[in-house]
Image: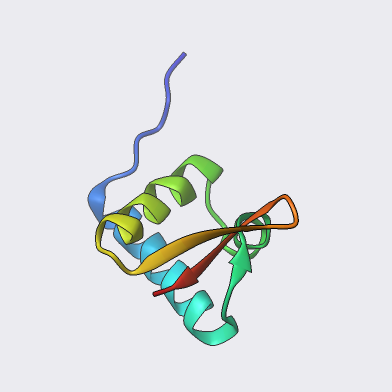
Amino acid sequence: MKQDIPSAEIVGLISGKIWSSLHKNGKSSITKLKTGIPCRASFLYFALGWLLREDKIIFIKADGQLFVQLK
């Protein structure tokens, strides 16, 4: 089974969309990000990893749900 692998450019663009969304709206659930940013879920996770590695976001668990917010 062939899987599509995103380029660094695509992951960077998705990271920018995530950052913009969090900057505008504040803390967000992963579920809300997945519905608000049109891309494959796996690409979204790559982009979240990118932002985490760049020390731009933190993850928070509350009420059994995972949230992300800007640092």
The colour scheme used here is rainbow
For the point 58% across and 74% down, the residue is: 27
* Image quarter of residue 25: bottom right
**Against 57, is 38 above or below?**
above
Total tally of numbered discs in the picture: 0
State left or right for residue 50 relative to residue 34. Answer: left
> Is residue 61 or residue 15 the one in the foreground?
61
For the point 41% across and 61% down, the residue is: 14
Instruction: Name the image quarter holding the C terminus.
Output: bottom left
Q: Residue 66, percent across and down? A: 62, 54
State left or right for residue 50 relative to residue 58. Answer: left
**Against 3, is 39 above or below?**
below
* Image quarter of residue 35: bottom right
For the point 63% across and 65% down, the residue is: 36
Residue at the far top in the pictured view:
1
For the point 38% across and 63% down, the residue is: 15
Q: Residue 32, percent across and down? A: 67, 62
State left or right for residue 31 relative to residue 47. Answer: right
Residue at the far bottom in the pictured view:
24
> Is residue 62 or residue 67 the one in the foreground?
62
